[in-house]
Image: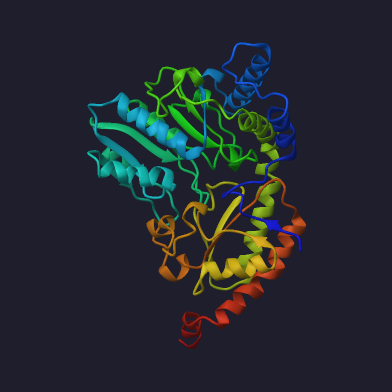
């Protein structure tokens, strides 16, 4: 049975071109990039070539890119760097719908001497900017908002917020793990100070990420050790994966138009047909401002986990929430923050596509899923109550 993979916001397949770029670094180019001899210099050259490719994708200077182990490390590095650079300020603002990489760190900070404000969102997951601006103060050291929500795909107006924050001398960081590679990003004209990305969200391997730090931004390292990454992140670089990330960044730039045309069309077809064929289904998120590859649909009165299990039997892979919280039976904190009713939040499924999906795959899901939902509803006491009034 063929696997139809529609969970690309959780992780992506490593692109064949990325594997080809990495293999020489696992075989002949094994030197330490910090060493001085010839073979090591060849490795260092490949490392810097990858840095330039990531910088090109964001429209920044290679010197502004720090390689990390993942998006979470990039987020933690940015947040701790900003707070340590402003020791006299104890206020941090983020949102209620952040990925656990930021949300859980914010909760940790609130228990350890910082005042943390979690900005609410509306029913479409859009930020309450009036609330946000009202809570900025002279004590605010840092604002961290995600560029795109990992569960719903809703886009935050981070460029606009960064400009407003900059005028008050506050550092602005964005978790752009889901946005990079899916929508055009040009940081050269932006007021954003720091941006986190992760390799495995854009067809590079797991275990590698990057942090953009605008030139002139006060910074102190999170990983303290050697002189690597210009003294900003200790530890020998994961060269093979970094080279893979560089190749993936170049591919993402090449695929940007397809991501925003063909992938968007496939997503829209999937969404439109499922809503047309299945009653009591609804989109979660902002239909007008969201990632082109993502749709989050609630099928009322049934459990999302049951839907996933039955889709798995058909070879269809999707998610009932973010991969980082899928082990929890609690409803998604994102959908709860949006006020999605309990009977709908539990039946939510996130479909996230990539440039490797085909129309035949989408047609297969459209054909099979309505029967799955109908079968589960036949077993649901909540659905029976709705039918009998």
Which residue is more in the foreground, 92 or 155?
92
On the picture, is 36 further left or further right than 25?
left
Q: Quadrant of residue 194?
A: top left
Point out residue 226 in the picture as x, y percentages from the top left corner.
46, 20
Point out residue 40 in the picture as x, y percentages from the top left corner.
64, 17
Point out residue 91 in the picture as x, y percentages from the top left corner.
26, 36
Whether residue 364 is situated above or below residue 208 in the rendered picture: below
Q: Quadrant of the C terminus?
A: bottom left
Whether residue 99 is situated above or below residue 225 in the rendered picture: below
Q: Quadrant of residue 307?
A: bottom right
On the picture, is 129 further left or further right than 283?
left
Please give the name of the residue rendered at 65% of the width and 41% of the height, measured from the top-left corner.
Answer: 203
Point out residue 183 in the picture as x, y percentages from the top left corner.
59, 38
Whether residue 131 is visible to the viewer of this picture, yes or no, is no
Which residue is more in the foreground, 88 or 340?
88
Which residue is more in the foreground, 43 or 354?
43
Whether residue 385 is visible to the viewer of this picture, yes or no, is yes
Whether residue 262 is situated above or below residue 375 in the rendered picture: above
List the single residue furthest toward the bottom: 388
């Amino acid at each position: 049975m063929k696997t139809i993979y529609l969970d690309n916001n959780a992780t992506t397949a490593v692109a064949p071109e990325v594997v080809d770029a990495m293999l020489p670094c696992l075989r002949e180019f094994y030197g330490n990039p910090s060493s001085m001899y010839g073979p090591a210099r060849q490795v260092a050259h490949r490392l810097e070539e990858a840095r330039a490719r990531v910088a090109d994708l964001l429209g920044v200077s290679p010197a502004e890119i720090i390689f990390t182990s993942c998006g979470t490390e990039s987020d933690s590095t940015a947040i701790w760097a900003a707070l340590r650079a402003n020791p006299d300020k104890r206020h941090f603002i983020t949102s209620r719908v952040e990925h656990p990489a930021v949300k859980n760190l914010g909760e940790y900070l609130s228990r350890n001497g910082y005042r943390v404000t979690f900005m609410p969102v509306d029913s479409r997951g859009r930020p309450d900017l009036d609330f946000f601006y009202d809570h900025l103060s002279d004590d605010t050291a840092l604002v961290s908002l995600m560029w795109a929500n990992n569960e719903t795909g809703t886009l935050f107006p981070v460029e606009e917020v960064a400009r407003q924050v900059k005028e008050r001398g506050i550092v602005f960081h964005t978790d752009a793990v889901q946005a990079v590679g899916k929508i055009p990003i040009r940081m050269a004209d932006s007021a954003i100070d720091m941006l986190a990305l992760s390799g495995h969200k854009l067809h590079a391997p797991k275990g590698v990420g990057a942090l953009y730090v605008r030139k002139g931004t006060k910074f102190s390292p999170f990983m303290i050790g050697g002189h690597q990454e210009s003294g900003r992140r200790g530890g020998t670089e994961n060269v093979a994966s970094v080279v893979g990330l560089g190749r993936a960044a170049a591919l993402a730039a090449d695929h940007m138009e397809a991501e925003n045309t063909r992938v968007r069309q496939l997503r829209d077809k999937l969404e439109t047909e499922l809503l047309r064929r299945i009653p009591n289904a609804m989109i979660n998120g902002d239909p007008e401002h969201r990632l082109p590859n993502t749709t989050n649909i609630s099928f009322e009165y049934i459990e999302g986990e049951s839907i996933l299990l039955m889709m798995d039997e058909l070879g269809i892979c999707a998610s009932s929430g973010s991969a980082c919280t899928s082990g929890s039976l609690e409803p998604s904190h994102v959908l709860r923050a949006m006020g999605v009713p309990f009977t709908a939040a539990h039946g939510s499924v996130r479909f996230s596509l990539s440039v490797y999906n085909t129309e035949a795959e989408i047609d297969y899901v459209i054909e099979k899923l309505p029967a799955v939902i109908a079968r589960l509803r036949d077993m649901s006491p909540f659905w029976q109550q709705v039918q009998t009034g």
